[in-house]
Image: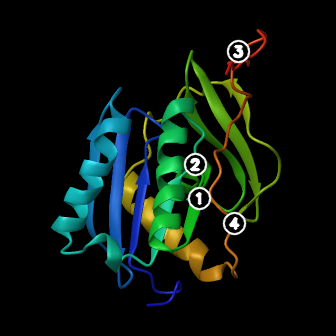
Amino acid sequence: MSVADPTLLAFDTSGPHIAAAVLQRGAVVAQRLEPMKRGQAENLMPILEELLAEAGLAWADLTALGVGIGPGNFTGIRISVAAARGLALGLGIPAVGVSSFELARAAESGTVHLPAPREMAYAQDFTAGVPSGPPRLEPRPAALADEIPDLAARLATRAAALLARTTPPIPRPAPLYVKAPDAAPARDAPPEILG
């Protein structure tokens, strides 16, 4: 199969969950959403293997990957993006990143809001289906849903659509962070290697 008609595994760990789906011949054939505040790193690969088995597929049958790139939990985003990059490299297949804004937006134009910590929301403006500015933090709107409905299936179908219209080489997925990480490198001098 070509990238235009992929056998695709898509997954996301940007929130308190592992969401995953398998898309084959344009249809979602298996999907799962496991609520999980901690443990995504330890549980991601076993869940993906179970999902592939449920779909009657092996890793070698995949022709593409889709991965949720956030925004969301800093560590969670890194888990899924690193897994997608490693799998893509090991399997020799493309991986495409899909933002949660893309999955949540209902219209071609307007502002999309996603839940963020501390009563805030991640926000991004879209004009004609394309982001028209960088993502930002705003006060949380009153009517904001806590999760994207049918997240796994939306991720798989959106990833397939992006792959179909993207000409190679396909850029590697990269995390979408709204703000810079809070961690800073150590200021101490590195250890001296003796010997």
On screen, residue 45 above or below 127? above
Q: What's the image's color scheme?
A: rainbow
- Which residue in the structure is indicated by mark 3? 191
Instruction: Give the mark, 3 or 1, whose residue is nearer the N terminus.
Output: 1
Using the rendered view, name the quadrant where residue 37 is placed: top left
- Which residue in the structure is indicated by mark 1? 97
Residue ID at (69%, 66%):
171
Task: Provide residue 58's location: percent of width, then percent of height.
Answer: 26, 72
Task: Provide residue 126's location: percent of width, then percent of height.
Answer: 74, 54
Where residue 69 is drawn, which disc sits there? 2
Q: CA distance from mark 4 to mark 2?
A: 13 Å
Residue ID at (60%, 28%):
141
Looking at the image, can residue 73 be seen?
no
Q: Secondary structure at mark 2?
A: loop
Instruction: Give the mark, 1 or 2, whose residue is nearer the N terminus.
Output: 2
Q: Secondary structure at mark 1?
A: strand
- Which residue in the structure is indicated by mark 4? 171
Q: CA distance from mark 1 to mark 4?
A: 9 Å
Residue ID at (38%, 56%):
152
Please tell me whether mark 1 or mark 4 is closer to you in this view. 4
Where residue 10 is drawn, which disc sits there? none
Check disc 2 and give the amino acid type: Ile
Q: CA distance from mark 3 to mark 4?
A: 36 Å
